[in-house]
Image (cartoon, grey):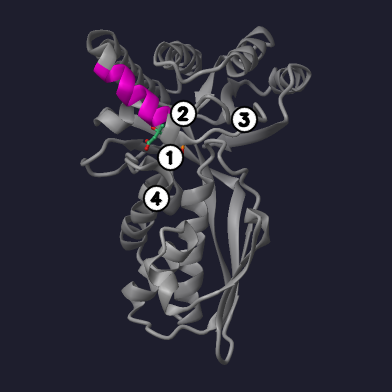
Amino acid sequence: MKGSASAPGKAILLGEHAVVYDKPAIAIPLSQLRAMVDFHQTERTFTICAADLKRPPWQWDDSAADSADPLASMAALTLRHLGVCAPTGKITIRSAIPIASGLGSGAAVSAALGRGIAGLYGETIANATLNALVYEVEKLHHGTPSGIDNTTVVFEQPVYFQRGQPIHTIKPSRRLDFLLADSGVSALTRESVTAVRQLLREEPARTNTLLDQIASAVASAQACLAAGKLLQLGELMTANHGHLRGLGVSSPRLDALVSAALQAGALGAKLSGGGRGGNIIALVEPSTRLAVERTLQSAGAKRVLTASLGG
Ligand code: PMV
């Protein structure tokens, strides 16, 4: 068997952090930004190469199955699901998704790897099953993940996600254009999630109010998406950035990028993902996209990506 498999990155439109506390959130797949896996069968060994993840080629043995390493763990979970005890083959992972920047790199690599290993054996894994396997690995990356990353990446659909609830995919009624601007700072989601948990312990009333405000912004944003109300959606995104600042997960650099996007005409802008670094996401109109992109670059963005939905 020989072939390839892939999975997209993702961006959170609204609701990060609150989603850890069972509030809803909205996320979109970034289909242009993917983790890819090439696979082919070999005679004896099972090797995983992931130079883009800055890892040396790595050969599977039985001890790898118990590893806390995300790649080894995803391989082990997939092989167990397939009932394969002595795997052979070569897997090469390539990923265009920046690491530790809130764009779903970990979930996308896991999903692509699971699909690639299944491909080696001529199998496909149903998305619901793959989602559950990737979620297990997300726990290694994040500690207490809500599940929004794996769900968006595996199903490759915009989702309105709430922990423990059936997955709702969203069909925007109009085309939406986004810019993602990278602060150039990598930050661990696990750490910002821990900081919010601590804030909740220290200042429960203020923190719970912020989490409730985020939940209500998400509910309004879903209605705006359905009705194609982009001005209001943008305002809700910007308001959500304010909530995330209140939770202490923004940074001067992220705030500067958000302000730059808004000043250049974005309809709304906010940090996206765990925060403290990573990316901001801005909602733009086709007429202002270029101006916002240039302004973000002048404001120090390390890279600006475009993404669109619907239309
Ligand atoms: O992986 P990131 O950085 O996009 O963060 C995921 C969003 C959080 O709400 C901060 C964590 C989670 O598990 O939902």
Identify the mark nearer the N-term, 2 or 1. Answer: 2
* The C terminus - image quarter: top right
Q: Quadrant of residue 288?
A: top right
Nearer the observer: mark 2 or 1; the answer is 2
* Magenta residue span: 192-201
Identify the mark nearer the N-term, 3 or 1. Answer: 1
Res. 219 visible in picture: no
* Residue at x-position 31% and y-position 62%: 129
Q: Is residue 300 above or below residue 152?
A: above
Q: Which residue is mark 2?
A: 13
Q: Is residue 197 above or below residue 52?
A: above
Identify the mark nearer the N-term, 4 or 1. Answer: 4
Callout 4: CB less than 8 Å from ligand 1: no
**As rendered, which of 262 and 169 lies closer to the eye?**
262
* In contact (CB < 8 Å): disc 4 and disc 3: no
Q: CA distance from mark 4 to mark 1?
A: 24 Å
| Spot occupied by residue 100 in the image (x, y as percentages of width and height) | 55, 39
Three-letter amino acid code of the residue under disc 3: Leu
**Residue 158 — which label?**
1
Q: Which residue is mark 3?
A: 180
| Spot occupied by residue 161 in the image (x, y as percentages of width and height) | 32, 37
**Residue 140 — which label?**
4
Secondary structure beneath disc 3?
strand
Three-letter amino acid code of the residue under disc 4: Leu
Q: CA distance from mark 3 to mark 1?
A: 16 Å
* Residue at x-position 52% and y-position 36%: 102
* In contact (CB < 8 Å): disc 2 and disc 1: yes
Callout 3: CB less than 8 Å from ligand 1: no
